[in-house]
Image (cartoon, rainbow, N blue to C red):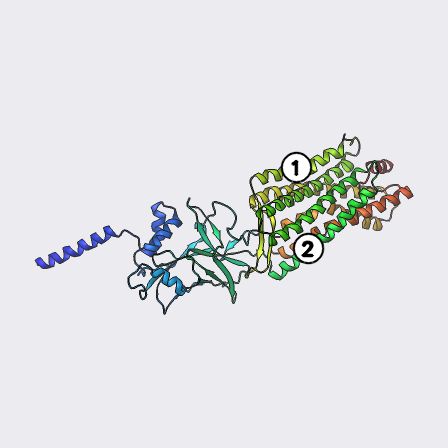
Protein backbone atom coordinates (compact mmCIF):
# COMPACT_ATOMS: atom_id res chain seq x y z
CA UNK A 1 0.00 0.00 0.00
CA UNK A 2 2.82 2.32 0.87
CA UNK A 3 4.37 1.67 -2.54
CA UNK A 4 1.05 2.31 -4.31
CA UNK A 5 0.61 5.53 -2.32
CA UNK A 6 4.07 6.74 -3.35
CA UNK A 7 3.37 5.90 -6.99
CA UNK A 8 0.10 7.90 -7.01
CA UNK A 9 1.81 10.85 -5.32
CA UNK A 10 4.60 10.71 -7.92
CA UNK A 11 2.08 10.66 -10.79
CA UNK A 12 0.17 13.68 -9.47
CA UNK A 13 3.39 15.54 -8.73
CA UNK A 14 4.56 14.92 -12.28
CA UNK A 15 1.29 16.22 -13.72
CA UNK A 16 1.36 19.32 -11.53
CA UNK A 17 5.03 19.97 -12.32
CA UNK A 18 4.47 19.48 -16.05
CA UNK A 19 1.52 21.91 -16.02
CA UNK A 20 3.57 24.46 -14.15
CA UNK A 21 6.49 24.22 -16.55
CA UNK A 22 4.54 24.01 -19.79
CA UNK A 23 1.74 26.50 -19.83
CA UNK A 24 1.58 26.67 -23.58
CA UNK A 25 -1.88 26.04 -25.08
CA UNK A 26 -2.74 23.06 -27.22
CA UNK A 27 -2.33 23.79 -30.93
CA UNK A 28 -6.01 23.30 -31.72
CA UNK A 29 -7.01 25.90 -29.09
CA UNK A 30 -4.44 28.60 -29.87
CA UNK A 31 -7.06 30.82 -31.53
CA UNK A 32 -9.30 30.79 -28.45
CA UNK A 33 -6.29 31.26 -26.18
CA UNK A 34 -5.07 34.33 -28.08
CA UNK A 35 -8.56 35.84 -28.17
CA UNK A 36 -8.89 35.52 -24.40
CA UNK A 37 -5.34 36.66 -23.63
CA UNK A 38 -5.88 40.25 -24.71
CA UNK A 39 -2.71 40.23 -26.82
CA UNK A 40 -2.59 41.27 -30.47
CA UNK A 41 -4.33 38.27 -32.03
CA UNK A 42 -2.21 37.56 -35.10
CA UNK A 43 1.10 38.22 -33.35
CA UNK A 44 0.01 35.89 -30.57
CA UNK A 45 -0.88 33.16 -33.07
CA UNK A 46 2.47 33.51 -34.86
CA UNK A 47 4.29 32.95 -31.59
CA UNK A 48 2.10 30.27 -30.00
CA UNK A 49 1.59 28.09 -33.09
CA UNK A 50 5.35 27.43 -33.22
CA UNK A 51 5.60 26.27 -29.60
CA UNK A 52 2.09 25.00 -28.89
CA UNK A 53 1.69 21.65 -27.13
CA UNK A 54 0.39 18.56 -28.90
CA UNK A 55 -0.58 17.94 -32.45
CA UNK A 56 -3.58 15.68 -32.91
CA UNK A 57 -6.63 16.09 -30.73
CA UNK A 58 -9.51 13.78 -29.98
CA UNK A 59 -11.85 16.73 -30.21
CA UNK A 60 -13.19 17.78 -33.58
CA UNK A 61 -11.67 21.10 -34.67
CA UNK A 62 -12.87 21.88 -38.22
CA UNK A 63 -10.54 24.84 -38.75
CA UNK A 64 -7.35 23.14 -37.51
CA UNK A 65 -5.26 20.54 -39.38
CA UNK A 66 -2.15 18.65 -38.33
CA UNK A 67 0.27 16.20 -39.91
CA UNK A 68 3.74 14.82 -39.16
CA UNK A 69 5.97 15.53 -42.12
CA UNK A 70 9.05 13.55 -43.15
CA UNK A 71 11.06 13.03 -46.31
CA UNK A 72 8.60 10.48 -47.68
CA UNK A 73 5.39 12.38 -46.92
CA UNK A 74 5.55 16.14 -47.43
CA UNK A 75 2.00 17.19 -48.25
CA UNK A 76 -1.24 17.83 -46.40
CA UNK A 77 -4.70 17.76 -47.99
CA UNK A 78 -7.25 19.47 -45.76
CA UNK A 79 -10.08 17.93 -47.84
CA UNK A 80 -11.91 21.27 -47.75
CA UNK A 81 -10.15 22.92 -50.67
CA UNK A 82 -6.55 23.46 -49.55
CA UNK A 83 -3.42 21.39 -50.27
CA UNK A 84 0.01 22.23 -48.79
CA UNK A 85 3.20 20.78 -50.33
CA UNK A 86 6.40 21.25 -48.33
CA UNK A 87 9.74 21.44 -50.18
CA UNK A 88 12.85 19.52 -49.08
CA UNK A 89 14.58 22.77 -48.17
CA UNK A 90 11.68 23.90 -45.98
CA UNK A 91 11.66 20.53 -44.22
CA UNK A 92 15.41 20.73 -43.57
CA UNK A 93 15.14 24.33 -42.29
CA UNK A 94 12.42 23.32 -39.85
CA UNK A 95 14.67 20.54 -38.44
CA UNK A 96 17.57 22.88 -37.65
CA UNK A 97 18.40 22.76 -33.98
CA UNK A 98 16.66 19.43 -33.37
CA UNK A 99 18.38 16.21 -32.27
CA UNK A 100 18.70 13.69 -35.07
CA UNK A 101 17.50 16.44 -37.38
CA UNK A 102 18.02 14.41 -40.52
CA UNK A 103 15.34 11.85 -39.64
CA UNK A 104 12.99 13.40 -37.11
CA UNK A 105 9.42 14.13 -38.12
CA UNK A 106 8.26 17.74 -38.13
CA UNK A 107 4.80 18.95 -37.19
CA UNK A 108 2.91 20.76 -39.95
CA UNK A 109 0.15 22.85 -38.39
CA UNK A 110 -2.53 24.62 -40.44
CA UNK A 111 -5.24 26.98 -39.21
CA UNK A 112 -8.14 28.20 -41.35
CA UNK A 113 -9.10 31.70 -40.21
CA UNK A 114 -11.91 34.11 -41.01
CA UNK A 115 -11.05 37.12 -43.19
CA UNK A 116 -12.52 39.52 -40.61
CA UNK A 117 -9.49 38.92 -38.39
CA UNK A 118 -7.31 40.63 -40.98
CA UNK A 119 -8.01 44.35 -41.02
CA UNK A 120 -5.73 46.65 -43.00
CA UNK A 121 -4.68 49.40 -40.62
CA UNK A 122 -1.58 51.12 -42.03
CA UNK A 123 -2.58 51.67 -45.64
CA UNK A 124 -5.35 50.81 -48.06
CA UNK A 125 -2.88 49.53 -50.61
CA UNK A 126 -1.35 46.12 -51.20
CA UNK A 127 2.38 46.18 -50.52
CA UNK A 128 5.07 45.13 -52.95
CA UNK A 129 3.45 45.00 -56.36
CA UNK A 130 -0.08 46.20 -55.77
CA UNK A 131 -1.46 44.16 -58.65
CA UNK A 132 -5.13 44.59 -57.82
CA UNK A 133 -5.11 48.20 -56.65
CA UNK A 134 -7.74 49.38 -59.06
CA UNK A 135 -10.53 47.08 -58.08
CA UNK A 136 -11.47 46.56 -54.40
CA UNK A 137 -10.19 42.96 -54.12
CA UNK A 138 -11.85 40.28 -51.98
CA UNK A 139 -10.57 37.01 -50.54
CA UNK A 140 -11.20 33.68 -52.22
CA UNK A 141 -13.63 31.73 -49.98
CA UNK A 142 -13.42 34.65 -47.50
CA UNK A 143 -10.74 32.65 -45.64
CA UNK A 144 -7.05 32.89 -44.73
CA UNK A 145 -4.71 29.92 -44.34
CA UNK A 146 -2.11 30.05 -41.54
CA UNK A 147 0.76 27.57 -42.01
CA UNK A 148 3.52 26.67 -39.51
CA UNK A 149 6.23 24.00 -39.80
CA UNK A 150 8.14 22.97 -36.69
CA UNK A 151 9.27 25.50 -34.11
CA UNK A 152 11.69 27.60 -36.15
CA UNK A 153 11.25 30.43 -38.63
CA UNK A 154 11.08 29.25 -42.24
CA UNK A 155 11.82 31.97 -44.81
CA UNK A 156 14.03 32.95 -47.77
CA UNK A 157 13.61 29.55 -49.40
CA UNK A 158 15.10 28.83 -52.81
CA UNK A 159 12.67 25.89 -53.10
CA UNK A 160 9.27 27.46 -52.40
CA UNK A 161 6.41 25.93 -50.48
CA UNK A 162 3.32 25.36 -52.64
CA UNK A 163 -0.22 25.98 -51.44
CA UNK A 164 -3.14 25.09 -53.66
CA UNK A 165 -6.42 26.99 -53.21
CA UNK A 166 -9.14 25.04 -54.98
CA UNK A 167 -11.43 27.37 -56.90
CA UNK A 168 -14.45 25.11 -56.47
CA UNK A 169 -16.99 27.76 -57.45
CA UNK A 170 -14.91 28.96 -60.43
CA UNK A 171 -15.33 32.53 -59.21
CA UNK A 172 -12.59 34.00 -61.40
CA UNK A 173 -9.07 33.44 -62.65
CA UNK A 174 -8.13 37.04 -61.87
CA UNK A 175 -6.47 36.47 -58.52
CA UNK A 176 -3.11 36.81 -56.84
CA UNK A 177 -1.42 35.06 -53.93
CA UNK A 178 -0.65 37.24 -50.92
CA UNK A 179 0.49 36.85 -47.32
CA UNK A 180 -0.25 38.95 -44.26
CA UNK A 181 2.64 41.29 -43.50
CA UNK A 182 2.61 41.84 -39.74
CA UNK A 183 3.88 45.18 -38.48
CA UNK A 184 5.46 46.01 -35.14
CA UNK A 185 2.49 48.03 -33.96
CA UNK A 186 0.19 45.03 -34.36
CA UNK A 187 -1.30 46.17 -37.66
CA UNK A 188 -0.66 44.64 -41.02
CA UNK A 189 -1.25 44.59 -44.73
CA UNK A 190 -1.44 42.18 -47.64
CA UNK A 191 1.80 41.72 -49.55
CA UNK A 192 2.86 39.74 -52.62
CA UNK A 193 6.57 39.76 -51.73
CA UNK A 194 8.07 36.28 -52.15
CA UNK A 195 4.92 34.71 -53.60
CA UNK A 196 4.16 33.77 -57.19
CA UNK A 197 0.76 32.87 -58.60
CA UNK A 198 -0.06 30.21 -61.15
CA UNK A 199 -3.24 28.50 -62.33
CA UNK A 200 -3.65 24.72 -62.35
CA UNK A 201 -6.95 23.53 -63.88
CA UNK A 202 -8.71 26.62 -62.58
CA UNK A 203 -7.17 26.35 -59.08
CA UNK A 204 -4.77 28.92 -57.65
CA UNK A 205 -1.29 27.64 -56.78
CA UNK A 206 0.80 29.89 -54.53
CA UNK A 207 4.56 29.29 -54.55
CA UNK A 208 6.03 31.21 -51.61
CA UNK A 209 9.53 31.34 -50.14
CA UNK A 210 8.30 31.57 -46.53
CA UNK A 211 5.46 30.49 -44.22
CA UNK A 212 2.84 32.85 -42.85
CA UNK A 213 -0.88 33.65 -43.23
CA UNK A 214 -1.83 33.15 -46.89
CA UNK A 215 -4.82 34.03 -49.03
CA UNK A 216 -5.82 34.62 -52.64
CA UNK A 217 -7.07 38.12 -53.45
CA UNK A 218 -9.52 38.10 -56.30
CA UNK A 219 -11.45 40.76 -58.14
CA UNK A 220 -14.39 39.80 -60.36
CA UNK A 221 -14.34 43.33 -61.82
CA UNK A 222 -11.03 42.83 -63.64
CA UNK A 223 -11.60 41.70 -67.25
CA UNK A 224 -9.76 38.81 -68.83
CA UNK A 225 -6.28 39.42 -70.23
CA UNK A 226 -7.50 39.55 -73.84
CA UNK A 227 -9.92 42.37 -72.99
CA UNK A 228 -7.20 44.23 -71.12
CA UNK A 229 -4.99 44.15 -74.23
CA UNK A 230 -7.85 45.36 -76.46
CA UNK A 231 -8.70 48.20 -74.08
CA UNK A 232 -5.04 49.24 -73.96
CA UNK A 233 -4.84 49.44 -77.76
CA UNK A 234 -8.07 51.45 -77.94
CA UNK A 235 -6.72 53.86 -75.33
CA UNK A 236 -3.39 54.33 -77.11
CA UNK A 237 -4.93 54.87 -80.56
CA UNK A 238 -7.66 57.15 -79.21
CA UNK A 239 -5.18 59.23 -77.22
CA UNK A 240 -2.90 59.62 -80.22
CA UNK A 241 -5.78 60.82 -82.40
CA UNK A 242 -7.05 63.14 -79.67
CA UNK A 243 -3.60 64.69 -79.39
CA UNK A 244 -3.53 65.31 -83.15
CA UNK A 245 -7.03 66.81 -83.37
CA UNK A 246 -6.82 68.97 -80.24
CA UNK A 247 -3.47 70.30 -81.50
CA UNK A 248 -5.21 71.13 -84.78
CA UNK A 249 -7.93 73.02 -82.88
CA UNK A 250 -5.32 75.10 -81.04
CA UNK A 251 -3.31 75.83 -84.19
CA UNK A 252 -6.37 76.89 -86.19
CA UNK A 253 -7.52 79.10 -83.33
CA UNK A 254 -4.15 80.83 -83.07
CA UNK A 255 -3.91 81.31 -86.85
CA UNK A 256 -7.41 82.74 -87.28
CA UNK A 257 -7.72 84.51 -83.95
CA UNK A 258 -9.44 87.88 -83.98
CA UNK A 259 -9.02 90.72 -81.53
CA UNK A 260 -12.51 90.08 -80.16
CA UNK A 261 -13.15 86.33 -80.04
CA UNK A 262 -16.40 84.85 -78.87
CA UNK A 263 -16.15 83.73 -75.26
CA UNK A 264 -17.58 80.31 -76.07
CA UNK A 265 -14.90 79.60 -78.65
CA UNK A 266 -12.13 80.58 -76.21
CA UNK A 267 -13.60 78.23 -73.59
CA UNK A 268 -13.74 75.40 -76.17
CA UNK A 269 -10.08 75.96 -76.98
CA UNK A 270 -9.14 75.96 -73.29
CA UNK A 271 -10.89 72.61 -72.88
CA UNK A 272 -9.09 71.33 -75.97
CA UNK A 273 -5.78 72.42 -74.45
CA UNK A 274 -6.59 70.41 -71.30
CA UNK A 275 -7.34 67.32 -73.36
CA UNK A 276 -4.17 67.82 -75.41
CA UNK A 277 -2.03 67.83 -72.28
CA UNK A 278 -4.05 65.05 -70.64
CA UNK A 279 -3.57 62.56 -73.47
CA UNK A 280 0.12 63.39 -73.89
CA UNK A 281 0.76 62.87 -70.19
CA UNK A 282 -1.32 59.68 -70.19
CA UNK A 283 0.88 58.12 -72.88
CA UNK A 284 4.03 59.37 -71.14
CA UNK A 285 2.77 57.98 -67.86
CA UNK A 286 2.20 54.52 -69.33
CA UNK A 287 5.61 54.50 -71.00
CA UNK A 288 7.62 55.77 -68.02
CA UNK A 289 5.89 53.41 -65.57
CA UNK A 290 7.17 50.46 -67.58
CA UNK A 291 10.59 51.74 -68.66
CA UNK A 292 11.84 54.02 -65.91
CA UNK A 293 13.04 52.99 -62.47
CA UNK A 294 13.37 56.57 -61.25
CA UNK A 295 10.65 57.25 -58.67
CA UNK A 296 10.96 61.04 -58.91
CA UNK A 297 10.20 61.01 -62.66
CA UNK A 298 7.10 58.84 -62.19
CA UNK A 299 5.93 60.98 -59.27
CA UNK A 300 6.27 64.16 -61.34
CA UNK A 301 4.37 62.68 -64.28
CA UNK A 302 1.69 61.36 -61.93
CA UNK A 303 1.27 64.85 -60.46
CA UNK A 304 0.98 66.45 -63.92
CA UNK A 305 -1.47 63.79 -65.09
CA UNK A 306 -3.63 64.39 -62.02
CA UNK A 307 -3.46 68.14 -62.64
CA UNK A 308 -4.55 67.80 -66.28
CA UNK A 309 -7.43 65.50 -65.40
CA UNK A 310 -8.72 67.93 -62.76
CA UNK A 311 -8.28 70.81 -65.20
CA UNK A 312 -10.34 68.90 -67.79
CA UNK A 313 -13.14 68.38 -65.26
CA UNK A 314 -12.98 72.04 -64.22
CA UNK A 315 -13.21 73.36 -67.77
CA UNK A 316 -16.16 71.08 -68.52
CA UNK A 317 -17.84 72.63 -65.47
CA UNK A 318 -17.01 76.08 -66.88
CA UNK A 319 -18.63 75.02 -70.16
CA UNK A 320 -21.75 74.21 -68.14
CA UNK A 321 -21.59 77.54 -66.29
CA UNK A 322 -21.25 79.47 -69.55
CA UNK A 323 -24.22 77.56 -70.94
CA UNK A 324 -26.18 78.55 -67.83
CA UNK A 325 -25.48 82.25 -68.47
CA UNK A 326 -26.66 81.99 -72.08
CA UNK A 327 -29.78 79.89 -71.59
CA UNK A 328 -31.04 80.82 -68.11
CA UNK A 329 -29.93 84.36 -67.33
CA UNK A 330 -29.70 85.57 -70.97
CA UNK A 331 -29.73 89.28 -70.11
CA UNK A 332 -27.36 91.22 -67.85
CA UNK A 333 -24.70 88.56 -68.14
CA UNK A 334 -21.74 90.88 -68.66
CA UNK A 335 -18.92 90.08 -66.25
CA UNK A 336 -15.82 92.26 -66.13
CA UNK A 337 -12.68 90.36 -67.20
CA UNK A 338 -14.82 87.30 -67.68
CA UNK A 339 -12.24 85.10 -69.44
CA UNK A 340 -9.50 86.02 -66.97
CA UNK A 341 -11.66 84.99 -64.04
CA UNK A 342 -12.62 81.76 -65.76
CA UNK A 343 -8.95 81.00 -66.41
CA UNK A 344 -8.07 81.57 -62.76
CA UNK A 345 -10.75 79.08 -61.75
CA UNK A 346 -10.06 76.61 -64.57
CA UNK A 347 -6.34 76.34 -63.91
CA UNK A 348 -6.17 77.51 -60.29
CA UNK A 349 -8.34 74.86 -58.61
CA UNK A 350 -6.38 71.93 -60.12
CA UNK A 351 -3.06 73.62 -59.26
CA UNK A 352 -3.97 74.11 -55.59
CA UNK A 353 -5.28 70.55 -55.34
CA UNK A 354 -2.18 68.85 -56.76
CA UNK A 355 0.10 71.07 -54.66
CA UNK A 356 -1.60 69.79 -51.52
CA UNK A 357 -1.46 66.21 -52.80
CA UNK A 358 2.19 66.62 -53.77
CA UNK A 359 3.12 67.64 -50.23
CA UNK A 360 1.55 64.43 -48.91
CA UNK A 361 3.55 62.37 -51.46
CA UNK A 362 0.66 60.40 -52.95
CA UNK A 363 2.10 60.03 -56.47
CA UNK A 364 3.98 57.06 -57.90
CA UNK A 365 3.61 53.86 -59.92
CA UNK A 366 0.09 52.46 -59.85
CA UNK A 367 -0.63 48.99 -61.27
CA UNK A 368 -4.19 48.28 -62.36
CA UNK A 369 -3.67 44.75 -63.66
CA UNK A 370 -0.93 42.16 -63.94
CA UNK A 371 -1.30 38.67 -65.40
CA UNK A 372 -0.19 35.52 -63.63
CA UNK A 373 3.28 35.45 -65.25
CA UNK A 374 3.73 39.21 -64.80
CA UNK A 375 4.26 39.53 -68.55
CA UNK A 376 1.32 41.82 -69.31
CA UNK A 377 0.94 44.71 -66.88
CA UNK A 378 -1.27 47.77 -67.00
CA UNK A 379 0.40 50.42 -64.92
CA UNK A 380 0.96 54.14 -65.05
CA UNK A 381 2.34 57.01 -63.00
CA UNK A 382 -0.65 58.11 -61.00
CA UNK A 383 -2.10 58.68 -57.52
CA UNK A 384 -1.27 55.68 -55.32
CA UNK A 385 -3.65 56.42 -52.43
CA UNK A 386 -7.24 55.40 -53.00
CA UNK A 387 -8.67 57.94 -50.57
CA UNK A 388 -7.18 60.79 -52.62
CA UNK A 389 -8.60 59.25 -55.81
CA UNK A 390 -12.08 58.95 -54.30
CA UNK A 391 -12.10 62.57 -53.08
CA UNK A 392 -10.25 64.51 -55.79
CA UNK A 393 -11.29 62.46 -58.82
CA UNK A 394 -14.50 60.53 -58.15
CA UNK A 395 -16.05 63.09 -55.83
CA UNK A 396 -15.06 66.10 -57.93
CA UNK A 397 -16.22 64.43 -61.13
CA UNK A 398 -19.55 63.58 -59.51
CA UNK A 399 -20.18 67.23 -58.60
CA UNK A 400 -19.22 68.46 -62.08
CA UNK A 401 -21.48 65.91 -63.78
CA UNK A 402 -24.38 66.74 -61.49
CA UNK A 403 -24.18 70.41 -62.48
CA UNK A 404 -23.62 69.75 -66.19
CA UNK A 405 -26.45 67.22 -66.41
CA UNK A 406 -28.75 69.88 -64.98
CA UNK A 407 -27.58 72.29 -67.68
CA UNK A 408 -28.16 69.63 -70.32
CA UNK A 409 -31.72 69.20 -69.07
CA UNK A 410 -32.23 72.97 -69.38
CA UNK A 411 -31.08 72.79 -73.02
CA UNK A 412 -33.60 70.05 -73.77
CA UNK A 413 -36.42 72.12 -72.25
CA UNK A 414 -35.41 75.23 -74.22
CA UNK A 415 -35.24 73.28 -77.47
CA UNK A 416 -38.71 71.89 -76.93
CA UNK A 417 -40.14 75.32 -76.12
CA UNK A 418 -38.72 76.87 -79.31
CA UNK A 419 -39.92 73.95 -81.41
CA UNK A 420 -43.47 74.39 -80.10
CA UNK A 421 -43.36 78.15 -80.75
CA UNK A 422 -42.29 77.77 -84.35
CA UNK A 423 -44.83 75.61 -86.16
CA UNK A 424 -43.52 76.39 -89.64
CA UNK A 425 -40.31 74.39 -89.43
CA UNK A 426 -39.82 70.76 -90.45
CA UNK A 427 -40.07 69.02 -87.06
CA UNK A 428 -38.40 65.81 -88.24
CA UNK A 429 -35.42 67.68 -89.62
CA UNK A 430 -35.34 69.94 -86.55
CA UNK A 431 -35.39 66.92 -84.22
CA UNK A 432 -32.42 65.40 -86.03
CA UNK A 433 -30.44 68.63 -85.68
CA UNK A 434 -31.36 68.88 -82.01
CA UNK A 435 -30.12 65.35 -81.37
CA UNK A 436 -26.81 66.13 -83.04
CA UNK A 437 -26.52 69.31 -80.98
CA UNK A 438 -27.24 67.42 -77.74
CA UNK A 439 -24.69 64.76 -78.65
CA UNK A 440 -22.05 67.41 -79.19
CA UNK A 441 -22.94 69.12 -75.93
CA UNK A 442 -22.55 65.80 -74.10
CA UNK A 443 -18.90 65.61 -75.13
CA UNK A 444 -18.26 69.26 -74.33
CA UNK A 445 -19.88 68.90 -70.89
CA UNK A 446 -17.92 65.71 -70.13
CA UNK A 447 -20.96 63.43 -69.83
CA UNK A 448 -19.05 60.31 -71.07
CA UNK A 449 -16.81 60.58 -68.00
CA UNK A 450 -19.85 59.57 -65.97
CA UNK A 451 -19.55 56.05 -67.39
CA UNK A 452 -16.69 55.56 -64.91
CA UNK A 453 -19.35 55.04 -62.23
CA UNK A 454 -20.94 52.18 -64.21
CA UNK A 455 -17.80 50.06 -64.65
CA UNK A 456 -18.80 47.83 -61.72
CA UNK A 457 -21.42 45.10 -61.74
CA UNK A 458 -22.80 42.74 -64.40
CA UNK A 459 -22.41 45.28 -67.23
CA UNK A 460 -18.92 46.38 -66.21
CA UNK A 461 -17.16 45.03 -69.32
CA UNK A 462 -19.45 46.68 -71.95
CA UNK A 463 -19.40 49.90 -69.91
CA UNK A 464 -15.61 49.76 -69.79
CA UNK A 465 -15.39 49.46 -73.57
CA UNK A 466 -17.85 52.33 -74.12
CA UNK A 467 -16.06 54.48 -71.54
CA UNK A 468 -12.67 53.83 -73.16
CA UNK A 469 -13.87 54.55 -76.69
CA UNK A 470 -15.77 57.74 -75.87
CA UNK A 471 -13.18 59.31 -73.59
CA UNK A 472 -10.01 58.32 -75.43
CA UNK A 473 -11.47 59.78 -78.65
CA UNK A 474 -12.97 62.84 -76.92
CA UNK A 475 -10.52 65.20 -78.62
CA UNK A 476 -11.71 63.96 -82.04
CA UNK A 477 -15.36 64.47 -81.13
CA UNK A 478 -14.79 67.99 -79.84
CA UNK A 479 -12.92 68.89 -83.03
CA UNK A 480 -15.87 67.72 -85.13
CA UNK A 481 -18.23 69.61 -82.80
CA UNK A 482 -16.33 72.90 -83.10
CA UNK A 483 -16.01 72.44 -86.87
CA UNK A 484 -19.75 71.85 -87.17
CA UNK A 485 -20.58 74.90 -85.05
CA UNK A 486 -18.23 77.13 -87.03
CA UNK A 487 -19.76 76.09 -90.35
CA UNK A 488 -23.25 76.45 -88.92
CA UNK A 489 -22.54 79.93 -87.55
CA UNK A 490 -21.17 81.12 -90.89
CA UNK A 491 -24.15 79.72 -92.77
CA UNK A 492 -26.64 81.36 -90.39
CA UNK A 493 -24.87 84.70 -90.70
CA UNK A 494 -25.13 84.49 -94.45
CA UNK A 495 -28.81 83.55 -94.51
CA UNK A 496 -29.76 85.74 -91.49
CA UNK A 497 -32.38 83.17 -90.60
CA UNK A 498 -34.64 83.67 -87.61
CA UNK A 499 -36.19 81.37 -85.03
CA UNK A 500 -33.19 79.16 -84.28
CA UNK A 501 -31.70 78.55 -80.86
CA UNK A 502 -27.95 78.96 -80.69
CA UNK A 503 -27.17 75.81 -78.67
CA UNK A 504 -23.64 76.13 -79.91
CA UNK A 505 -23.43 79.28 -77.69
CA UNK A 506 -20.67 80.64 -79.90
CA UNK A 507 -21.80 84.20 -79.29
CA UNK A 508 -23.83 85.80 -76.54
CA UNK A 509 -25.22 88.43 -78.87
CA UNK A 510 -26.39 85.91 -81.46
CA UNK A 511 -28.35 83.92 -78.89
CA UNK A 512 -29.92 86.98 -77.28
CA UNK A 513 -30.97 88.32 -80.70
CA UNK A 514 -32.44 84.95 -81.63
CA UNK A 515 -34.48 84.72 -78.43
CA UNK A 516 -35.66 88.34 -78.72
CA UNK A 517 -36.86 87.79 -82.29
CA UNK A 518 -38.79 84.69 -81.25
CA UNK A 519 -40.46 86.60 -78.49
* Closer-to-camera residue (452/472): 472
* Residue at the image position 37 percent from the left and 55 percent from the top: 153
The residue wearing badge 1 is 349
The numbered disc on residue 236 is 2
Rendered location of residue 375, percent (x, y): 58, 60
**Residue 9 occupies which quadrant of the picture?**
bottom left
* Closer-to-camera residue (35/264): 264
Q: Compare marks 2 and 1 and give the one earlier in the sequence.
A: 2
Measure the alpha-carbon separation of dots 2 and 1.
28 Å
Bin the neighbour count of mark 1 within 10 Å (Cα to Cα): few under 14, some 14-19, many 20 and up.
Answer: some
| Furthest-right residue in this view | 495
Would residue 129 appear left or right of 504 to someone viewing this image? left
Given this view, does label 2 or label 1 mark the residue nearer the observer?
Answer: 2
Badge 1 marks a residue whose secondary structure is helix
Rendered location of residue 443, percent (x, y): 73, 47
The numbered disc on residue 7 is none
Badge 2 marks a residue whose secondary structure is helix
Where, quadrant-wise, is the N terminus in this rendering? bottom left
Rendered location of residue 373, percent (x, y): 55, 61
Residue 246, compared with residue 266, is above or below; it is below
Would residue 96 appear left or right of 16 to someone viewing this image? right
Bin the neighbour count of mark 2 within 10 Å (Cα to Cα): few under 14, some 14-19, many 20 and up.
Answer: some
| Furthest-bottom residue in this view | 72
Where, quadrant-wise, is the C terminus in this rendering? top right
Amino acid sequence: MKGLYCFVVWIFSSIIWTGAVSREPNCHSVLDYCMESGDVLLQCMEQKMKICAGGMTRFSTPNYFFKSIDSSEKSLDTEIGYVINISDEALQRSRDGLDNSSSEDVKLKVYLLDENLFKITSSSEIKEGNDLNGSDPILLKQSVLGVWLGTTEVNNLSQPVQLKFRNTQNQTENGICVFWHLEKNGGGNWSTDGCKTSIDNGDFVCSCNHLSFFAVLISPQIPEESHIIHLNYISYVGSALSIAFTALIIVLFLCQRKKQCEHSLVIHVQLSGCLFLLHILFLCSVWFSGHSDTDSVCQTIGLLLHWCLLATFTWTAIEGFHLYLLLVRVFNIYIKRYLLKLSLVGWGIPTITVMICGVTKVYGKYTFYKDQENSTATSLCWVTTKTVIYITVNGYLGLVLLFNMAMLAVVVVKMRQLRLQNVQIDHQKRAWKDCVSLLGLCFVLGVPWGLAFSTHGPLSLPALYVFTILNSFQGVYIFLWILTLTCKARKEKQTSSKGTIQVSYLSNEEYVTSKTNNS
